Amino acid sequence: METIRQDYVAYIATILQLAGEKETQLKAKQIFALEKSLAKVHWTPESARDTLKNYHPMSLSQLNKFTPDYQWQGFIQQWKLSDEQLAKVIVENDSAVQQLAKILANTPVSTLQDYLLFHYLSSKANYLNEAFSDARFNFYSS
């Protein structure tokens, strides 16, 4: 398992380096640490399938109180939803959402940006130059 993790961190660093980023080893370790923290709060597949555990209707203000570390208003405003549409939101995996809010609030913006950049480039690697495509192939084929 440790070898796979090391290979993944190396893959992250390679993708970032190909994109012209600096300090790629440090950024790769930070991205991996973020991903580990996200994985720890995810529900098991069995829990996620439980419809009763997953149904938590609440208003936007209740959601903001439920996750005080993350205020959803700014994020949700981008969707241009009406007040009526926002009168009730359904929160699934509620404990995971609470922990996710804490993780987002406590993660430096630069790490979140690096995380998004890596995942975007990795997902598009086959459409970029050969070096990106080869890096992705080499990681996922081994």
Image: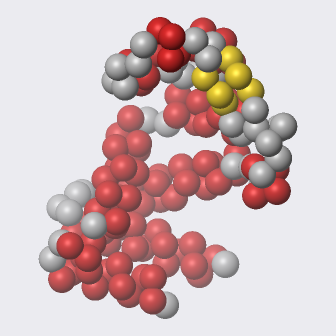
In the image, what residue occupies the spot 18% across and 72% down? 128
Rendering coords of residue 129 (x, y %): 15, 77
Residue 110, image quadrant: top left
Q: Residue furthest front?
A: 84
Left or right of residue 128: residue 30: right
Q: Residue furthest bottom?
A: 142
Q: Is residue 18 above or below residue 90?
A: below
Left or right of residue 13: residue 48: right
Q: Is residue 109 above or below residue 57?
A: below
In the image, what residue occupies the spot 45% across and 82% down? 140
Rendering coords of residue 38 (x, y %): 61, 48
The quadrant in which the N terminus is found is bottom right
In the image, what residue occupies the spot 61% across and 23% down? 89
Q: Is residue 109 above or below residue 68?
A: below
In the image, what residue occupies the spot 32% across and 81% down? 135
Residue 136, image quadrant: bottom left
Left or right of residue 70: residue 133: left
Rendering coords of residue 25 (x, y %): 38, 63
Q: Is residue 95 visible?
A: no
Q: Is residue 88 above or below residue 129?
A: above
Q: Is residue 6 visible?
A: yes
Q: Give the camera-side residue of 89 and 18.
A: 89
